[in-house]
Image (cartoon, grey):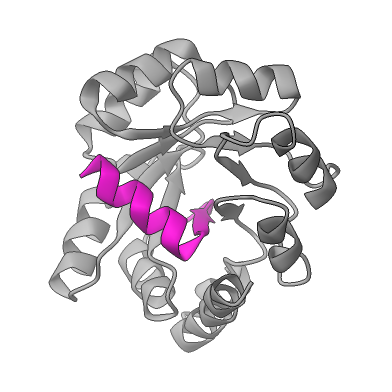
Amino acid sequence: MKSQVLQLIQRLRIVAIVRLDDLSQAVNISSALAAGGILAQEFTLTNPDALRVLPEVKQSLTSQGYETAIGVGSVRNLTEAQAALAAQADFIVSPITSVPIIQACRQAQVAVMPGAYTPTEIALAWDSGADVVKVFPARALGPGYIKDVLAPMPYLKLMPTGGVDLTNIKTFLTAGAVALGIGGNLIDAKAIQASDWAAVTNIARQYSEAAAHA
């Protein structure tokens, strides 16, 4: 399961970050993203409903025949990690490097992507057992930073998150990122509020195709 999740993320190269105040339409949101080729989706704990909707989303996408990886993000401590694991998250993402979170995920054989910023933090996250290191926030760092970090540490698997959009997807991936975490630029809150699922799917398709051709 863990290897399949990581293979899916590295093959499709985008993790959609669903950070919304209202998750009452979570199944429709997730289905619209999947229809556009975005099959790795992260529901963040900034909304307390994330853990509740996770099983519903997974069941719905599976029934539609999609191969997906549905995870939990914004995990900040061991208690939250344990709750996400109990909810059957396919992967766990954190904005920080927390060794207890990494250890809990490794013990449960669930993919873990801790956040890090500096080369030292990135190396610590990797050496502590991260499957992928979320370089966050990447907005001010840019693709050149990813290339520079990988020069002396080419074995790292990095997922820049923050500030990624259609204009820089190719540059980040060319720099060596194995995947990209994308939130607000991919998840159109206005389209979701209007229940315009075709628009959500259209944006998702633009991103998935951009990643595929990078």
* Residue 46 placement, left or right of 9: right
Q: What residue lies at 26% left-to-right and 41% top-to-bottom?
A: 2
Query: Compared with residue 175, is residue 204 higher up or lower down, i.e. above or below?
Result: below
Q: What residue lies at 22% left-to-right and 25% top-to-bottom?
A: 108
Q: Position of residue 136 (x, y in %)?
A: 68, 37
Query: Compared with residue 25, is residue 194 higher up or lower down, i.e. above or below?
Result: below
The image quarter in which residue 203 lies: bottom right
Between 211 and 75, the one nearer to me in the picture: 211
**Would you say residue 128 is visible in this rendering?**
yes
Q: Position of residue 134 (x, y in %)?
A: 59, 37
**Would you say residue 138 is visible in this rendering?**
no
Q: Examine the structure image and report whether residue 43 is included in the region drawn in magenta.
A: no
Q: Quadrant of the N terminus?
A: top left
* Residue 85 placement, left or right of 134: left
Query: Compared with residue 177, is residue 155 higher up or lower down, i.e. above or below?
Result: above
Between 45 and 166, the one nearer to me in the picture: 166
What is the residue that sits farthest to the left in this orientation? 63
Q: Quadrant of the C terminus?
A: bottom right
What is the residue that sits farthest to the top in this orientation? 100
Q: What residue lies at 60% left-to-right and 67% top-to-bottom?
A: 186
* Residue 74 placement, left or right of 54: right
Q: How many marks?
A: 0
Q: Position of residue 153 (x, y in %)?
A: 66, 30
The stretch of residues the image draws in magenta is: 1-22
Q: What residue lies at 26% left-to-right and 51% top-to-bottom?
A: 4
Q: Position of residue 176 (x, y in %)?
A: 66, 50
Query: Compared with residue 145, is residue 207 higher up or lower down, i.e. above or below?
Result: below
